[in-house]
Image: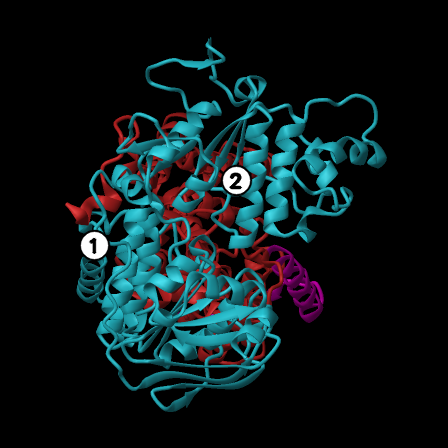
């Protein structure tokens, strides 16, 4: 069963109730027809419920086998390395990690592999009901497919899976039934075969969604951002790109494709090993970040928790941070200017102005993303670079963010974003650049590319080249 | 309607999420400190004859001012996410010795002040630079503190430096304009200044932001290096000022004059409720914390607590304050 809903609709609360972290105010829970009491995490676990959280709970320095033994509750005799490895192996095979050495430290694995180790760990605890809370939020498309296959296999084996997600295409691949939460109330469950993407979106929003992607109206402006023969960590060959005023460039690529690296190098987040970056015809130095900002380049990272947000500071302070120089001329913060800027940005991004004084951590994921993105407009940039603009953001806020990107481009900004969601790249961008293993594969207008083209490019660069030759 | 979509009211039962629950916590710490300080005043007045006298009050106010001035500087270090400087005690000693040595060499007041403040500024900037370069702040300042203490011992040959006082020095050390000691004037003015700097200047804002999320601060173009160096320099400078006031007051600079200052200052900052992990806190609250710590120390002194007992109590206060705020904070996020 898939559990869907906008940010703040109550999905996480429901998951917390099932895992014993939150007590329900009313109502009963039943497993196999028997009412159960899930008042503590331990009881929930004993009832066979297990959750794979968005943030994995593996210890990076320990091996996969050791991680699976932690909290397993079957401690008898010595934890010899060999025994742990032997115990771990069958479960690792179950999740398709038979090639993995269980003695390897978890930190050497990819995120997708870690996710599967976590699932294996829960299976080792004899979990019968698996709850996966946005398991694919941090994964690229190919890896998502592996996870969904695994989920399907687990369900076929007779385990129950509750799958929480924002990615609607997954629902059609794996779910049998869908329960939509809206404003904390559940809608009656429906079988997936009775649904289309449009009717599903309408159920989530409580109204039909006119269009996910804003209309393109590319006005051919002057080139604003010119990137010539840039090399940086994670790139195998020099990359050259141009973004015009009014244009949205989408960089498509899986994890490890190097697409986001180009943006990071241009933004001064990582070193430029070779090549030049020009803004409006003038060559600029972009390292450290301060100089990139001064040159009119704004960069919004893919991980707002890591470096996009100050959770314990107010929304206002978050919004005015990059533009502190303008808000605090001569080093003194002018409250009036600060307030005006925050109001202006909140207005543009449709954030509740009454919440400007609240801590950023109290906002929903979608609104946090709007803050992380919106704060950059305060510096009046000429170039806006965004990495994974809608990671962990619900459908409604997602459409809003796309519309904002389009509005900004219409106002004359050069916008470039990197994404591993190819529907997003094709739907939003005017021009698409595809990346594979640190190389730029091709640049083409979005209207001339099909989803199959993009998928082929980002998975098999050589094949794509052969096809286009 | 569409404007509210992303921030629609959450389901009943979870409505508390809309309220910023961090808010009331902000007032817990100062309230506790004020009540506790009142309690000590009451207990002291009732049980100890010497407690509520004018002379004793001047002693308390002076002690609170010295601890308080250093705590104000330390607040910048803590808010910027660098925990504490464990070398303020030694920096204060070094500054007082520089001040005393200058007079012993027959230099004037300005030269003496210059020497002590320079010593403080340099040690602070160096430590800030080291921490900004990625070294652990606790270990760095612990090491530098030990080195400074050693340096001071070498310079003074392990002897107390005495000097002949001048009217100006006497005024700095024991003057009481409008009946209030100079130290306390300085404490009040610095509290106001530090509050203004933290709340109203770009540097102050950057200090909070660096402490709240260092990576996000860097990504927003804030210089972590500059902020860290400035924070440590301010802490050191505050220690230097404390050193000068004390040397001027007792017209000598014994090496061990400030022993226990590190822990007193840390206790003051923590009791005031400045978050150990940075990003939150206020100068005013650290000042309140310092007053509380001074009251407590004086009360214990008058009640004939031994040095060991006094240190035990102060240490326990640090532990209790840290645990209490940690609990408040984690309860708030779950």
Task: Indicate left or right for B94 with B194 as reference.
Answer: right
Query: Residue A278 versus residue A140: which sits nearer the camera?
Result: A140
Q: Residue at position x 73%, y 47% from top? A: A105
Quadrant of res B21? top left
**Residue A80's x, y, as percent?**
84, 33
Circles 2, 1 touching at the beta carbon (< 8 Å): no
Segment colored magenta? B138-167
Q: Main secondary structure of the magenta part?
A: helix
Residue B42 versus residue B276 in the image, above or below = above
**Residue B134's x, y, as percent?**
60, 64
Which of the numbered marks, if any, corresponds to residue B19? none
Query: Residue A270 versus residue A322: which sits nearer the camera?
Result: A270
Is A403 included in the stretch rendered in magenta?
Answer: no
Element at badge 2?
A: helix
Q: CA distance from mark 2 to mark 1?
A: 44 Å
Q: Quadrant of the N terminus of chain A?
A: top left
Pointer 2 residue = B318
> Are marks 2 and 1 in one subunit?
no
Q: Residue at position x 18%, y 62% from top? A: A344
Residue B322 versus residue B263 in the image, above or below = above
Q: Quadrant of the C terminus of chain A?
A: bottom right
Pointer 1 residue = A350
The answer for which chain carries disc 2 is B
Q: Which chain is cyan?
A: A
Q: Residue at position x 67%, y 50% from top? A: A107
Q: Which chain is red?
A: B
């Amino acid at each position: 069963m898939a559990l869907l809903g906008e940010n703040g609709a109550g999905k996480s609360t429901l998951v917390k109730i099932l895992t014993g972290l939150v007590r329900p105010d009313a109502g009963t829970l039943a497993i196999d027809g028997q009412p159960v009491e899930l008042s503590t995490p331990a009881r929930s676990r004993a009832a066979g419920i297990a959750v794979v959280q968005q943030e994995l709970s593996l210890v990076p320095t320990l091996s996969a086998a050791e991680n699976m033994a932690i909290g397993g509750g079957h401690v008898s005799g010595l934890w010899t390395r060999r025994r742990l490895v032997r115990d771990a192996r069958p479960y690792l095979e179950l999740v398709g990690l038979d090639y993995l050495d269980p003695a390897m430290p978890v930190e050497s694995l990819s995120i997708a592999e870690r996710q599967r180790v976590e699932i294996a760990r829960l299976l080792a605890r004899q979990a019968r009901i698996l709850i996966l809370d946005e398991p694919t939020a941090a994964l690229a498309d190919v890896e998502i497919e592996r996870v969904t296959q695994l989920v399907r296999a687990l369900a076929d084996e007779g385990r129950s899976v509750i799958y929480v997600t924002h990615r609607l295409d997954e629902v059609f691949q794996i779910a049998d039934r869908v329960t939509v939460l809206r404003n904390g109330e559940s809608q009656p469950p429906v079988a997936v075969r009775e649904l289309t993407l449009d009717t599903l979106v309408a159920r989530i929003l409580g109204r039909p969604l006119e269009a996910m992607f804003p209309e393109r109206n590319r006005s051919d402006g002057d080139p604003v951002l010119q990137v010539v023969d840039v090399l940086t960590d994670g790139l195998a060959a020099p990359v050259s790109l141009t973004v015009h005023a009014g244009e949205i460039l989408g960089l498509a690529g899986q994890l490890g494709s190097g697409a986001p690296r180009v943006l990071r190098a241009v933004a001064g987040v990582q070193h430029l090993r070779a090549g030049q970056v020009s803004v409006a015809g003038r060559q600029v130095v972009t390292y450290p970040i301060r100089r990139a900002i001064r040159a009119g380049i704004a960069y919004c990272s893919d991980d707002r928790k890591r470096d996009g947000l100050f959770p314990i500071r107010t929304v206002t302070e978050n919004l005015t941070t990059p533009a502190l120089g303008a808000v605090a001329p001569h080093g003194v913060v002018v409250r009036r200017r600060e307030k005006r800027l925050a109001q202006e940005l909140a207005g543009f991004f449709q954030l509740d102005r009454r919440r400007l004084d609240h801590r950023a951590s109290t906002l929903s994921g979608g609104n946090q993303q709007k803050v992380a993105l919106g704060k950059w407009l305060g510096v009046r940039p000429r170039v806006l670079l965004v990495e994974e603009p809608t990671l962990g953001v619900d459908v409604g806020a997602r459409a809003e963010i796309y519309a904002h990107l389009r509005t900004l481009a219409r106002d004359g900004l050069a916008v470039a974003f990197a994404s591993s969601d190819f529907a997003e790249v094709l739907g939003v961008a005017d021009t698409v650049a595809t990346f594979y293993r640190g190389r730029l594969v091709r640049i083409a207008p979005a209207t001339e590319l099909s989803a199959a083209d993009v998928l082929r490019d980002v998975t098999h660069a050589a094949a794509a080249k052969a096809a286009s030759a | 309607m569409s404007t509210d979509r992303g921030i629609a009211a959450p389901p009943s039962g979870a409505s508390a999420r809309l309220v910023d629950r961090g808010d009331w916590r902000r007032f817990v710490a100062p309230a506790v400190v004020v009540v506790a300080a009142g309690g000590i005043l009451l207990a002291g007045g009732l049980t100890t004859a010497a407690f509520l006298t004018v002379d004793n009050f001047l002693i308390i106010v002076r002690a609170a001012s010295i601890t308080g001035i250093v705590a104000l500087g330390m607040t910048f270090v803590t808010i910027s996410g660098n925990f504490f400087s464990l070398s303020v005690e030694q920096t204060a000693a070094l500054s007082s010795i520089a001040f005393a040595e200058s007079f012993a060499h027959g230099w004037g007041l300005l030269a003496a002040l210059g020497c002590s403040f320079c010593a403080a500024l340099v040690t602070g900037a160096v430590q800030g630079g080291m921490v900004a370069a990625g070294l652990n702040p606790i270990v760095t300042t612990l090491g530098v503190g030990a080195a400074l203490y050693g340096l001071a011992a070498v310079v003074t040959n392990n002897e107390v430096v005495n000097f002949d006082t001048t009217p100006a020095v006497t005024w700095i050390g024991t003057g009481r304009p409008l009946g209030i000691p100079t130290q306390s004037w300085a404490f009040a003015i610095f509290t106001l200044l530090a509050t203004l700097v933290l709340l109203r200047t770009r540097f102050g804002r950057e200090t909070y932001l660096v402490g709240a999320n260092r990576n996000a601060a860097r990504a927003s173009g804030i210089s972590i290096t500059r902020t860290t160096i400035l924070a440590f320099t301010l802490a050191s400078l505050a220690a230097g000022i404390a050193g000068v006031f004390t040397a001027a007051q007792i017209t000598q600079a014994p090496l061990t004059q400030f022993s226990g200052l590190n822990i007193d200052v840390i206790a003051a900052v923590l009791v005031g409720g400045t978050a150990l992990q940075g990003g939150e806190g206020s100068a005013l609250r650290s000042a309140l914390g310092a007053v509380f710590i001074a009251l407590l120390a004086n009360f214990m002194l008058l009640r004939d607590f031994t040095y060991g007992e006094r240190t035990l109590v102060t240490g326990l206060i640090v532990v209790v304050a840290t645990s209490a705020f940690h609990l408040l904070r984690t309860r708030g996020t779950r």
